[in-house]
Image (cartoon, rainbow, N blue to C red):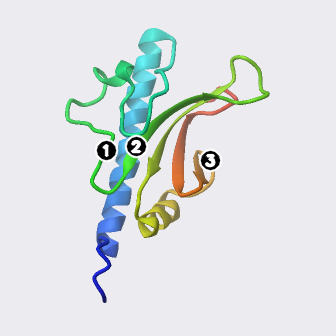
């Protein structure tokens, strides 16, 4: 097979498992913060953990990985009332084959949302369910 500069299939599968683990790490940290503060961490940009989670996440945890980037999400749902929001974590990658593999392994249905080359894991849905 030609060298396309992308990781082999087995490496993509292992990386997809790491993404699932990272989603869980962020979810547990987010729930822990919420249970201690009765509020959700604030929205930040891709690759940056919310400041509120820095002391809750494992000390070596990073949102920027060699193959993918995590993005914590906190956003209101338009037209749904003042206290309706979604909390989640999105993964993006420059490797479209990896993103396809990730969607195959984790899924495209709730609690996952696949849009435009990214996959979001919904931690708290618009209905407030956690």
Q: Earlier in the sequence, mark 3 or mark 2?
A: 2
Q: In this view, which residue lies farthest toward the top?
A: 37
Q: Quadrant of the C terminus?
A: top right
Residue denoted by label 3 = 110
Q: Residue at x 20, y 35 (%)?
A: 60
Q: Nearer the viewer, residue 62 or 27?
A: 62
Q: Is 2 above or below relative to 60?
A: below
Q: Position of residue 127 (x, y in %)?
A: 70, 29
Q: Is 1 above or below relative to 40?
A: below
Q: Quadrant of residue 12?
A: bottom left
Residue denoted by label 1 = 64
Q: Position of residue 82 (x, y in %)?
A: 72, 17
Q: Marks 3 and 2, Cα distance to the nearest angstrom?
A: 18 Å
Q: Is 21 above or below relative to 129?
A: below
Q: Residue at x 58, y 45 (%)?
A: 111
Q: Earlier in the sequence, mark 3 or mark 1?
A: 1
Say what secondary structure mark 3 lies in.
loop
Residue depth check, mark 3 versus mark 1: number of the one nearer the observer:
1
């Amino acid at each position: 097979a030609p060298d396309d500069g992308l990781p082999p299939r087995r490496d993509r599968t292992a990386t997809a498992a790491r993404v699932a683990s990272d989603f869980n790490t962020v979810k547990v940290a987010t729930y822990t913060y919420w249970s201690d503060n009765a509020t959700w961490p604030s929205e930040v940009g891709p690759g940056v953990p919310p400041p509120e989670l820095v002391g809750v996440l494992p000390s070596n945890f990073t949102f920027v990985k060699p193959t993918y980037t995590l993005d914590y999400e906190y956003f209101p749902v338009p037209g749904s009332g003042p206290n309706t929001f979604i909390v989640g974590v999105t993964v993006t990658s420059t490797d479209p084959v990896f993103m396809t593999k990730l969607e195959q392994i984790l899924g495209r249905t709730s609690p996952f949302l696949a849009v435009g080359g990214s996959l979001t894991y919904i931690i708290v849905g618009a209905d407030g369910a956690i």
